[in-house]
Image (spheres, rainbow, N blue to C red):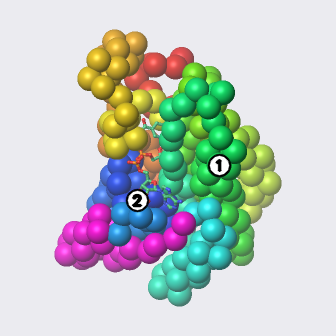
Amino acid sequence: MVNKTAIITGASKGIGKQMAKTFAENGYNLLINYNNSKKEAEELCQQLNSKGIIAYAYRADVSDRKQVDSMVEFCIKRFRNIDLLINNAGVAQSILFTDITQDDWKRMIDINLTGVFNCTQSVAKYMISEKKGKIINISSIWGMVGGSCEVHYSTVKAGIIGFTKALAKELGPSNIQVNSIAPGVIQTDMLKGLNDKDLEELKYDTPLMRLGTADDIAECALFLASDKADFITGQVISPNGGFVI
Ligand code: NAP
């Protein structure tokens, strides 16, 4: 058991929730961040607490720097240090480029990109002073190859990849590894706009002939967070079933 502390943003649902369970099973103390899904986050927290895991649910909108700083201070007060930050919180929107409004664009940038900046800058100062830490940023295959009808989403996810690479260079001398996971199509609420036919077509286009699960991503994150990945930094790993090669 590792006895380390992790902040996972957007851990009330989907990939973040599964990562919280996986990391808890592997000895991590957790701060489970959420924004709207209080009930889900608190239930998850209680479930983990009942198994003897130290976990707190904390509401903070990642796009709001003050809320993020309060969350990070709370984490430091409770756990004294932060070993791992997973920037997972995100929103998606499928829309024609010509229909994207200024508000849609701003919301996408604020949550998916400024959110990553806010959480990382707030946590980095503690990691730098400890001379260790790991940061994992959740991008997307669309950040690698671009997705039609998701121009703003693809833009921020590509931004996360640039952010990861640049920060890995800057924080490497402080013994902090910064990596990105770019998932393929993963079965979570994020896919709820797609009908059965769309999902079948996506499966058909995937060499491994299935959609991904939150567990596929959680296992990848667990590896990147482990000592086994100490020489890996600035990389993008894409668990996508071969959808993008
Ligand atoms: P999801 O089930 O919709 O979960 C999204 C999570 O993000 C929720 O816990 C939500 O919390 C949180 N969140 C949203 N806005 C937030 C904010 N302003 N502040 C804090 N938390 C916020 O989606 P998912 O599929 O698990 O996605 C997780 C990450 O994986 C996202 O970054 C997404 O872009 C990425 N991804 C997903 C897929 C996929 O196919 N599912 C593929 C590639 C990449 P509340 O509900 O509490 O607000």
The type of residue carrying mark 1 is Asp
The mark that comes first in sequence, 1 or 2, is 2
Q: Indicate left or right for 194 with 124 as reference.
A: left
Q: Quadrant of the N terminus?
A: bottom left
Q: Is residue 43 found inside the magenta-colored segment of the image?
A: yes
Residue 181 position, x and y percent, is: 53, 40
Mark 1 C-beta closer than 8 Å to ligand 1:
no
Q: Point out which mark residue 11 bears.
A: 2
x and y percentages locating residue 11 in the rendered image: 40, 59
Residue in front for this viewpoint, 218 or 113: 113
Q: x, y (%) of residue 94?
A: 51, 32
Q: Which residues are magenta?
A: 39-61
Relative to residue 46, is residue 234 depicted above or below?
above
Front position in the image: 60 or 75: 60
Rendered residue at 71%/72% (across/down): 125
Q: Is residue 159 magenta?
A: no
Amino acid type, callout 2: Ala
> Label 2: few (<14), some or many (≥20) within 10 Å?
many
Q: Residue furthest bottom?
A: 77
Q: Position of residue 89 (x, y in %)?
A: 50, 54
Residue 172 position by quadrant: bottom right
- Give the number of the disc on residue 21: none
Task: Please say if 95 is above or below 201.
Answer: below
Disc 2 CB within 8 Å of nearest ligand 1 atom: yes
Picture residue at 60% right of the left edge, 37% below the top: 153
Instruction: Indicate the quadrant where residue 233 lies.
Output: top right
Secondary structure of the residue carrying numbered label 2:
loop
Residue 187 is left or right of residue 36, and the answer is: left
Residue ID at (29%, 68%): 39
Nearer to us: label 1 or label 2:
1
Q: Which residue is mark 1?
A: 103
